[in-house]
């Protein structure tokens, strides 16, 4: 039985009155049966009882009938009850009547959430510090502090794993499902020695780079020399511009290559000159960069927090594509993505196969909007699987027909198509209009992703099947359609306005062509 702590006066009186009994109990007898000193010792170290914790748990984190309708992973009250049900409602953070080392470690972990672009106060940082500092606290106050630590841990783990916001409510074109398993409640119930939050962060290497960038901009905020340079930049090229670049790039160089690096990392034209576009970027404050990082770290948290060893990463704002295998970038090139009125959605799907010399079945939206039912002669029209004259189609009946473009040099999909099954009919492909890859603005497609040098990418993916560029060229020369199954390589077609360079070493700040950033920023604030 647990005994509540007695006052000093009552405790002293108890010792005096029972002193004789205490002596006789020690006279040559075993102490297995206990004694008043045992009870006194227990009184000094008495823990908060499960009953008290459960009482405060029910008051502060009640479970209602609505809990069954809520997302169980985002329902903090349900997660709180799950933890303590598995732990027989015993304290997790208290050691006797004080908060132990793990509580101190969690406070530090919550403070470090600022490098995730998250506000530590959202997770009750001040309340946690107050709980640790309190003296002679009541059982109820200790129980409240105990629960505050658990709630902080669970909330932080949830937001790192799933994101603070629900992407379905923010971006209707975000279709990359986060299937991450949130294990925080079970992890905590086991009372582990390591309560680090790191395991809940995205394993995406871009996320770790962004964390470092946040620290960089935080330091520059308090760099008076840098801030003075920002104020003095004016509207003309000068040594001041170079000094700003040196600070932001952590470089001591002052040559044209450094200017080009700065321009590349800010998604500018790489002229090597401090032109008007570059000066405009130099005016951007650390706070603006911090906001961009916060927005895009949230986007990365919307993706699964684990990554396969092999994957394709398409950056919509950057209009570039990368193929990574075991941490190495095997393919980096330009791409073309959806125009602003036919935008490419964010999707994450596994590649299924590669088609050489692919025919193209036109979406009905293109048949209706672009051709008005008048089908050019270089297309084939089918109804019920049978070829019919193109003239059979008109603006009122075009939905009854299938319009197909056969493989060939004029084919809209070019010579290579990368299939990844999805309901939006989005895939990667070649194009006969390869001149567009020279454009800086490559938001031009109907939604699919066009890839520069797709034969090389296909050969890299099909390497294990011994299909190389030469084999692909033979099929193309014969205009022969051939489908090759591929490993299920995850294809990330992502809308992030901050990305990593192709070597995953530097952070690149991009434009916002579809104007999506402001919505996320407003909700995060």
Image: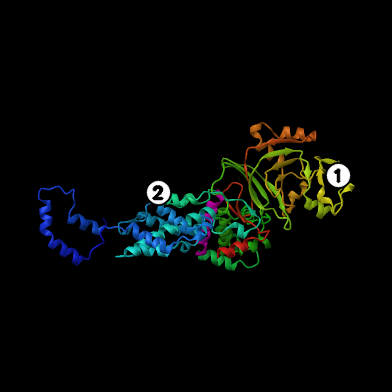
Residues in magenta, as a range: 204-222
Residue 272 appears in the rendering: yes
Please name the predominant secondary structure of the magenta segment in the image: helix
Task: Give me the residue at 71% from left, 51% from top.
Answer: 337
418 vs 186, left or right, is right
Does the magenta portion include 210?
yes
Alpha-carbon distance for marks 2 and 1? 67 Å
385 vs 22, left or right, is right
Does the magenta portion include 135?
no
Q: Position of residue 416 (x, y in %)?
A: 73, 40
Q: Position of residue 58 (x, y in %)?
A: 41, 61
Disc ID at residue 190: 2
162 vs 264, left or right, is left
Image quadrant where residue 250 sits: bottom right
Which of the image's four quarters has the C terminus?
A: bottom right
Q: Is residue 124 above or below residue 478?
A: below
Q: Nearer the viewer, mark 2 or mark 1?
A: 2
Q: Name the residue tied to disc 1.
A: 378
Image quadrant where residue 6 sits: bottom left
Residues 183 and 211: in front is 183
Task: Give me the residue at 50% from left, 55% from top.
Answer: 158
Residue 275 appears in the rendering: no
Q: Position of residue 225 (x, y in %)?
A: 52, 65
Q: Residue furthest front?
A: 65
Asked if the residue at tag 1 contacts the one at tag 2, i.e. Cβ–Cβ closer than 8 Å, the answer is no
Q: Is residue 494 above or below residue 241?
A: above
Q: Residue furthest top?
A: 466
Residues 125 and 222: in front is 125
Q: Is residue 463 above or below residue 35?
A: above
Residues 69 and 193: in front is 69
Disc with the residue nearer the chain's start (2 vs 1): 2
């Amino acid at each position: 039985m647990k005994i509540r702590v007695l006052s000093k006066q009552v405790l002293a009186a108890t010792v005096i009155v029972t002193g004789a009994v205490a002596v006789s109990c020690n006279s040559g007898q075993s102490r297995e049966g206990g004694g008043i000193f045992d009870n006194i010792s227990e009184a000094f170290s008495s823990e908060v009882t499960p009953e008290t914790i459960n009482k405060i748990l029910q008051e502060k984190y009640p479970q209602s009938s609505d809990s069954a309708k809520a997302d169980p992973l985002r329902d903090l009250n349900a997660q709180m009850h799950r933890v303590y049900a598995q732990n027989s409602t015993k304290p997790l953070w208290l050691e006797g009547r004080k908060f132990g080392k793990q509580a101190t470690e969690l406070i530090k972990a919550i403070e470090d959430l600022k490098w995730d672009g998250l506000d530590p106060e959202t997770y009750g940082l001040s309340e946690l510090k107050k709980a640790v500092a309190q003296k002679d606290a009541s059982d109820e106050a200790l129980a409240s502090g105990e629960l505050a630590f658990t709630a902080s841990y669970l909330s932080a783990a949830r937001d790192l794993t799933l994101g603070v916001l629900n992407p379905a409510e923010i971006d209707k074109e975000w279709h990359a499902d986060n299937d991450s398993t949130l294990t925080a409640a079970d992890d905590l119930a086991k009372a582990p020695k390591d309560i680090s939050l790191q395991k809940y962060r995205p394993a995406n290497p871009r996320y770790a780079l962004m964390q470092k960038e946040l620290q960089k901009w935080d330091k520059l905020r308090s760099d008076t020399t840098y801030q003075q340079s920002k104020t003095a930049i004016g509207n003309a090229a000068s040594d001041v511009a170079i000094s700003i670049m040196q600070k932001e790039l952590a470089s001591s160089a002052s040559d044209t290559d450094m200017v080009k690096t700065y321009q590349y990392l800010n998604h500018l034209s790489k002229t090597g000159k401090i032109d008007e576009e570059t000066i405009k970027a130099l005016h951007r404050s650390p706070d603006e960069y911090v906001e961009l990082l916060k927005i895009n770290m949230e986007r990365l948290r919307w993706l699964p927090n684990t990554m396969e060893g092999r994957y394709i990463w398409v950056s919509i704002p950057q209009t570039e594509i990368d193929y990574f295998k075991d941490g190495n970038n095997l393919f980096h090139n330009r791409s073309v993505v959806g125009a602003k009125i036919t935008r490419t959605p964010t999707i994450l799907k596994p590649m299924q196969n590669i088609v050489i010399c692919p025919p193209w079945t036109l979406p009905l939206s293109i048949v209706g909007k672009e051709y008005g039912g008048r089908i050019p002669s270089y297309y084939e029209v089918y109804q019920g699987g049978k070829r019919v004259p193109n003239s059979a189609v008109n603006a009122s009946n075009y939905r009854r027909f299938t319009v197909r473009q056969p493989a060939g040099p004029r084919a809209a999909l070019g010579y290579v198509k990368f299939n990844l099954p999805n309901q939006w009919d989005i895939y990667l492909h070649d194009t006969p209009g390869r001149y567009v890859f020279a454009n800086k603005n490559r938001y031009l497609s109907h939604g699919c992703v066009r890839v520069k040098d797709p034969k090389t990418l296909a050969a890299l993916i099909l390497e294990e099947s011994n299909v190389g560029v030469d084999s692909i060229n033979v099929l193309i020369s014969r205009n022969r359609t051939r489908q090759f199954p591929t490993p299920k390589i995850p294809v990330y077609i992502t809308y992030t306005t901050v990305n990593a360079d192709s070597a995953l070493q530097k952070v690149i700040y991009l434009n916002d062509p579809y104007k999506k950033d402001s919505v996320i920023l407003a909700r995060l604030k």
